[in-house]
Image: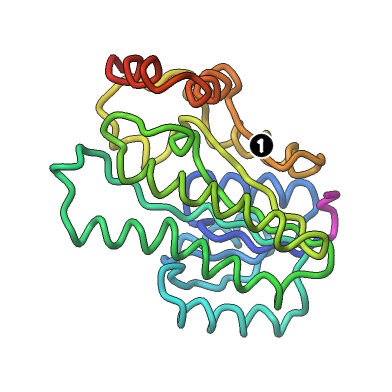
Amino acid sequence: MDFNGKRIWIVGASSGIGQALARELAGRGARLVLSGRSVDPLKTLARELGQGEVVPFDISDPESLDDARGEILLGGPLDGMITTAAMYDPGYVSQIERDSARKLVEVNLLGTLWFAQAAKGLLREGGQLVIFGSVAGYFGLPKGQLYSASKAAVINLVESLRVEFAPEIDVRLISPGFVNTRLTEKNDFDMPFMIEPDAAARRIADGLAGRKFETHFPRRLTWGLKMLRRLPYRLSLWLTARM
């Protein structure tokens, strides 16, 4: 996609990758709709960029999403919809609290589903629906079990959507590795090949400008995890037990 003059909705724009991506796409000429749960950071970002419709909502709440959808439609159809929204609560399965687990699934998986369902009424024909998975979804990784499971489900969902929505909607999958955000600050282990949000945003924008279904980075990490998935379980589980 050539972003110049295109109307793009970014969910999760109040911080992290979403905020960096808003800056990157604005620099490429996109007209933005900025969403997240917290209105003040969105307004601050819009002032910084000198543009941007601010539409706060909670992606895990379908009624909140419906209200946002109605407001956005007043400005006409979209050329792109991007959701970076996610919850991350690292820990072993035995440590997961039920309320936290329920909320994580509501945001990461169900919120993605509600967002995708809204695409057909919002996007122009040929518009992009961009959903964030994670390399954590490639294989079950230590101390990220529920997050990994939710992102594995998201990846599966996006693969289905790619076929179901074609050719009217161009569905894309983004699979980041470790990016320096408030989510990765929760980790207490070494994170190889960590990159900054601005670098991640450039790679995402470049990927969306191309034709590939999935944009994944950094390659030194992602290709290794993709290969892990292809190994026999006897070997792959032995390797992950030593991570």
Please state if 172 lies on the left or on the right of 16 as rendered: right
Determine the secondary structure under disc 1: strand
Q: Quadrant of the C terminus?
A: top left
What range is drawn magenta here?
A: 1-5
Rendered residue at 50%/31% (across/down): 177
Please state if 61 lies on the left or on the right of 51 as rendered: left
167 in relation to 54, above or below? above
Q: Which of the pair 201/23 is nearer the observer?
A: 201
Q: Residues within 10 Å of mark 1 (few under 14, many from 20)?
A: many
Q: Position of residue 213 (x, y in %)?
A: 72, 42
Q: Position of residue 105 (x, y in %)?
A: 35, 58
Q: Quadrant of residue 199?
A: top right
- Is-magenta flag for residue 18? no
**Mark 1 = which residue?**
215
Q: Which of the pair 175/199 is nearer the observer?
A: 175
- Please, what is the dominant secondary structure of the magenta stretch? loop
Q: Position of residue 216 (x, y in %)?
A: 61, 33
Type of the residue with mark 1: Thr
Q: How many marks?
A: 1
Please state if 144 lies on the left or on the right of 27 as rendered: left
182 in relation to 162, above or below? above
Rendered residue at 14%/42% (across/down): 94
Q: Position of residue 65 (x, y in %)?
A: 51, 76
Q: Quadrant of residue 118?
A: bottom right
